Amino acid sequence: MSQTQFDILLPSPEDTAHFAQFLAAHLVPGDVVLLSGGIGAGKTHLARAAIQSLLTTPEDVPSPTFTLVQTYDTVKGELWHADLYRLTDTSELIELGLTDAFEEAVSFVEWPDRLGSLCPPNALGLDLQLAADDDARRITVRSPSERWAFVKDYAAK
């Protein structure tokens, strides 16, 4: 299995939200999106925009930093948003049901380095970094399979 890697430059928070909405429109149950980057890189902003675009009834989408996981009923079925920054032991992920969600739901995972061996091999990796100014983001996309080829189409625009 070959991995594709490329960058997308998003000049504004609105551009990041637009990319998130594009991505969300293509997701299906079993898809896992791994969001890496430092604090303030825009991981939660991207996840929030994607989640809100899939909700049938608008609702607040808080960061799951303290709860570890928030779940949502969306037009794509169940969606899990996990923030593993405060995770102390990977066994908590199994107890929470996150590994089952990787098979049955759409999942966004912030701080995926804390997954260890539980990281799904076909997940889409998005590494967000501050770019030219505080509003711009550079996203390094790591695509382990052809499943994620549509993301490259977005980058080509």
Image (cartoon, helix red, strand yellow):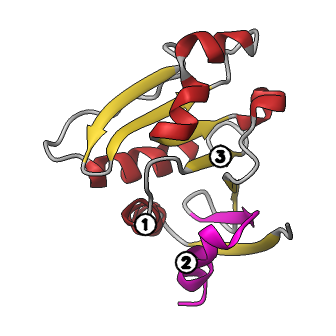
Residue 118 drawn at (x, y percent): 76, 30
Residue in front for this viewpoint, 46 or 32: 32
Residue in view at x 45 percent, y 40 percent: 105
Whether residue 71 sits left or right of residue 102 in the image: it is left
Range covered by the magenta-colored residues: 136-157
What residue is pinned by disc 2?
Answer: 150
Magenta region includes residue 115: no
Closer to the N terminus: mark 2 or mark 1? 1
Whole-angstrom CA distance, mark 2 to mark 1, is: 8 Å
Residue 46 drawn at (x, y percent): 49, 51
Whole-angstrom CA distance, mark 2 to mark 3, is: 16 Å
Closer to the N terminus: mark 3 or mark 1? 1
Secondary structure type for disc 1: loop
The numbered mark at residue 18 is none
Q: Which residue lies furthest to the bottom in this view?
A: 157
> Where 151 falls versus 156 (above or below)?
above
What residue is pinned by disc 3?
Answer: 34
What residue is pinned by disc 1?
Answer: 26
Whole-angstrom CA distance, mark 3 to mark 1, is: 15 Å
Q: Which three-letter amino acid code belongs to the residue tagged 2?
A: Phe
Magenta region includes residue 140: yes
Whether residue 21 sits left or right of residue 40 in the image: it is left
